[in-house]
Amino acid sequence: MLIEHIRQRLHELDATAQRRRRRTVLTPCQPAQDWQGQGELLGFCSNDYLGLASHPDLIRALAEGAQRWGVGSGASHLVSGHSAAHASVEALLARWFEPHIPDAQALLFSSGYSANLALMSALANEHTTLLLDKLNHASLIDGAWLAQAKSRARWQRYPHGRLDALERLLAACESPIKLIVTDAVFSMDGDIADLPALLRLAERHDAYLVVDDAHGLGVLGPQGHGSLAHFGLRSTRLIYMGTLGKAVGVGGAFVAAPPLVVEWLLQTARPYIYTTAMPPALAHALEVALRLTEGEEGQRRRLHVQALLTQWRRGLDAIEWGTPAPRPVPSSTPIQPLIVGDNAQALAWQAALQAQGCYVGAIRPPTVPPGTARLRVTFSAAHGPGDVQRLLDALQQASHTLSAESASA
Ligand SMILES: *Cc1c(COP(=O)(O)O)cnc(C)c1O
């Protein structure tokens, strides 16, 4: 029965072009990668925005960390897994966030997914309403489900970016504890949330603002300190989650928040308590990655990505699209999606680009809303201007191919 049920559901996924397949890479995270069975392709799909994932300094730092600390942590943070390497990264991150969250403290997690589950489930109780942007990341939504199941917290979603709708929900909300929860940079659209306006709403309605900066940390703000720095925000009402496996190039995540919030997470957040601490060697490498990110080299890399984005936008304007034409989403971040709409069409674009030696992700529901399947193009500081041009040429060529096919169909 179980197996029959699964077979049926997988069949449905095939029928709607929603079946996902993994592909195996044979090379480190870098633009030109060797794919098992498919040869070398130039990729525009990673979240390694600063190109740090295979930086020689980080490779050295990880090896050094393993020499100093061994590999595994052996236990959870509250038992014996919390090393001086972890503590040192937390102290550094606390300093990053002190200008934005008074007396900020930081708490390391092994992944952003678990950090969001921890935040949502530990902060919410039966007196809480969580208010989420419709396009928030899956981990925040799952966190809201967990909060509801565990403690009968309520949660509601407002249409993407619609502060008027959010304000109506806030005005009607009778819960004494209100949390507005948003991605800072939306992962599948690349747009930046209006955090100053969200914070004003939080202040006006005695709410808190939880910011998931997975795609902003390292990319936005002076020294890459992220979206709070980008907007110059400072408030005791801010609770921040950043991930360390995207622009920072390593892995893991952290929450930066007022001291009592961090203490509460440490005491009660089950996704924090009941899991093995990240390997200390990784924490050691993280410290080097964070210093690279905020230093001169990070700055150089941020400027380089901005130059690539300018080149990309100009090049896109010059493409002569046939039909169907994908629709670029306005975005000032390294996430530059092209909306295709139909799932099968998104896969056709992906295949046509692959025939030109370029690889981009075809993102389909449920990751994005139905009817908005897209090519999620991302740029990295590891790309050069020649790479951007290759993708532009491939798009032009793919457009010819696909419009010829649709004309003959
Ligand atoms: C990637 C991502 C996460 C999850 O972080 P991981 O460290 O990969 O688990 C959370 N939120 C957003 C917006 C993300 O893009």
Image: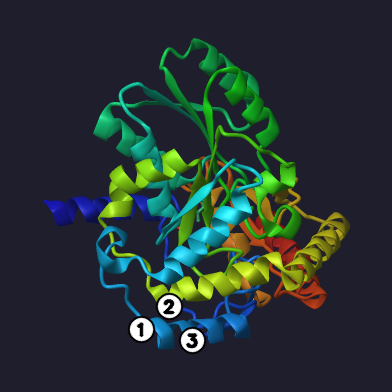
Would residue 183 be found to the left or right of residue 81 on screen? right
Residue behind label 1 places its C-beta within 8 angstroms of ligand 1: no
Q: How many marks?
A: 3
Classify 10 Å Cα crowding around label 1: few (below 14), some (14-19), many (20 and above).
few
The amino acid pointed to by label 2 is Ala
* Relative image position of residue 392 (x, y in whole percent): 78, 66
The amino acid pointed to by label 1 is Gly
* Relative image position of residue 280 (x, y in whole percent): 40, 73
Residue 70 — which label?
A: 1
Residue named by callout 3? 64
Q: Which of the marked residues, 3 or 2, is nearer the chain's N terminus?
A: 3
Rendered-image quadrant of the C terminus: bottom right
* Relative image position of residue 32 (x, y in whole percent): 64, 81
Q: Nearer the viewer, residue 189 or 243?
A: 243
Q: Which of the marked residues, 2 or 1, is nearer the chain's N terminus?
A: 1
The residue depicted at 62 percent of the width and 74 percent of the height is 52
Residue behind label 2 places its C-beta within 8 angstroms of ligand 1: no
Would residue 245 be found to the left or right of residue 141 on screen? right
* Relative image position of residue 184 (x, y in whole percent): 61, 44
Residue named by callout 2? 281
Would residue 228 be found to the left or right of residue 156 on screen? right
Classify 10 Å Cα crowding around label 3: few (below 14), some (14-19), many (20 and above).
some
Q: CA distance from mark 2 to mark 1?
A: 7 Å
Q: Is residue 101 visible?
A: yes
Q: Nearer the viewer, residue 159 or 177?
A: 177
Q: CA distance from mark 1 to mark 3?
A: 9 Å
